[in-house]
């Protein structure tokens, strides 16, 4: 099969691959309050964020001492789902636990 070679003054189209950026990541944060029990916060960290109990305890203490703690870093859709799950569980148990997300 013959290959086409452009003549003088002719141009050939060059296909370029589009550059794909990795998805933007978001930190999911828990906020301290005076009503939510530490046990419930640990339960949420284990059940929603799949943290092992020692890690969940460390994050809970961080939230308690600093007023805020990072639960994990996820894509936007996953982070939003985790925030909603925390709010749903807290509402079911009557706690005002607040969870938010912010860009990393």
Image (cartoon, helix red, strand yellow):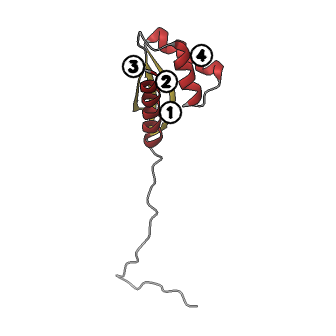
Where residue 49 sits in the image (x, y, percent)?
55, 31
Between the C-alphas of marks 3 and 2, the distance is 18 Å
Foreground residue, 24 or 79?
79
State which tag comes first along the sequence, 3 or 2: 2
State which tag comes first along the sequence, 1 or 3: 1
Where residue 43 sits in the image (x, y, percent)?
57, 22
For numbered disc 3, what is the local secondary structure? loop
Tag nearer the camera, 1 or 3: 3
Task: Quickly name the residue at label 1.
Answer: 73
Indicate the quadrant containing the C terminus: top left, top right, bottom left or bottom right: top left
Evaluate if marks 1 and 4 touch, with contact meaning CB atoms under 8 Å apart: no
Which residue is found at the position 40% from the left and 77% from the top? 12
Task: Quickly name the residue at label 3.
Answer: 96
State which tag comes first along the sequence, 1 or 4: 4
Relative to 88, is 12 above or below? below
Evaluate if marks 1 and 2 touch, with contact meaning CB atoms under 8 Å apart: yes
Q: Quadrant of residue 1?
A: bottom right
Q: Is residue 1 left or right of residue 70?
A: right
Where residue 9 sits in the image (x, y, percent)?
34, 81
- Determine which of the numbered discs, if any, sits on residue 90 in the image: none
Task: Quickly name the residue at label 4.
Answer: 57
Task: Quickly name the residue at label 2.
Answer: 70
Which residue is found at the position 44% from the left and 70% from the top? 15
Between the C-alphas of marks 1 and 3, the distance is 23 Å
Which residue is found at the position 65% from the left and 18% from the top? 54
Which residue is found at the position 38% from the left and 83% from the top? 8
């Amino acid at each position: 099969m013959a290959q086409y070679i452009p003549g003088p003054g002719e141009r050939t189209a060059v296909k370029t691959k589009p550059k794909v950026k990795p998805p933007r990541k978001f930190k999911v944060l828990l906020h301290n309050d005076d009503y939510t029990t530490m046990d419930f916060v640990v339960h949420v960290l284990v059940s929603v964020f799949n943290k092992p109990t020692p890690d969940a305890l460390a994050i809970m203490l961080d939230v308690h001492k600093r007023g805020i703690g990072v639960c994990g870093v996820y894509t936007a859709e996953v982070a939003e789902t985790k925030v909603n799950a925390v709010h749903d569980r807290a509402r079911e148990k009557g706690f005002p636990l607040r969870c938010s997300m912010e860009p990393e």
